[in-house]
Image (tube, helix red, strand yellow):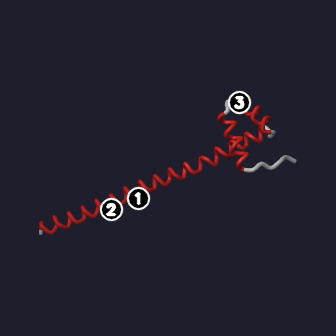
Amino acid sequence: MGRQQNDEFRKEAVRIALTSGRSRQQVADDLGIGKSTLGKWIVAQRDSAKEPERDQGLEKENERLRRENRILREERGVLIRATRIFASQAL
């Protein structure tokens, strides 16, 4: 059975694999882990990194929509008041 590696080791292994310019096999051999294990760690880190980006995008979109909704409500209120003024003058 293989050794359990801590999160810090995994993150560092992924960083080395992605930035060193060496093959995954070379990095895995140097670290004493399997190439497939290193590949799984890389995929897992990429997947976990994508989640916050998507959340940030949703937060920005929600904020933009809230702002737009507030502006539209204000404009609607102005139009309602203007309609009332014009209607009272026509009578």
Cα separation, mark 1 vs mark 3, equals 48 Å
Residue holding disc 2: 73
- Foreground mark, 1 or 2, reads 1
Q: Secondary structure at mark 3?
A: loop
Q: Amino acid at mark 3?
A: Arg
- Residue placed most toward the observer, 50 or 12: 12
User: In the figure, 91 relative to 20: above or below?
Assistant: below
Residue 45 circle label:
none
- Residue placed most toward the observer, 90 or 65: 65
Cα separation, mark 1 vs mark 2, equals 11 Å
- Residue placed most toward the observer, 72 or 91: 72
Residue 66 circle label:
1
Local crowd size for mark 2, using a 10 Å CA cut-off: few (<14), some (14–19), many (≥20): few
Q: Secondary structure at mark 1?
A: helix
Local crowd size for mark 3, using a 10 Å CA cut-off: few (<14), some (14–19), many (≥20): few
Q: Amino acid at mark 1?
A: Arg
Residue holding disc 3: 22
Local crowd size for mark 1, using a 10 Å CA cut-off: few (<14), some (14–19), many (≥20): few
Q: Position of residue 91 (x, y in %)?
A: 12, 69
Residue 88 appears in which quarter of the rendering? bottom left
Asked whether, in this view, residue 73 is left or right of residue 52, the answer is: left
Q: Earlier in the sequence, mark 1 or mark 3?
A: 3
Residue occupying image coordinates x 64% and y 44%: 46
User: In the figure, 22 relative to 65: above or below?
Assistant: above
Q: Amino acid at mark 2?
A: Arg
- Foreground mark, 2 or 3, reads 3
Residue occupying image coordinates x 41% and y 54%: 64
Residue occupying image coordinates x 22% and y 66%: 81
Cα separation, mark 2 vs mark 3, equals 57 Å
Q: Position of residue 89 (x, y in %)?
A: 12, 67
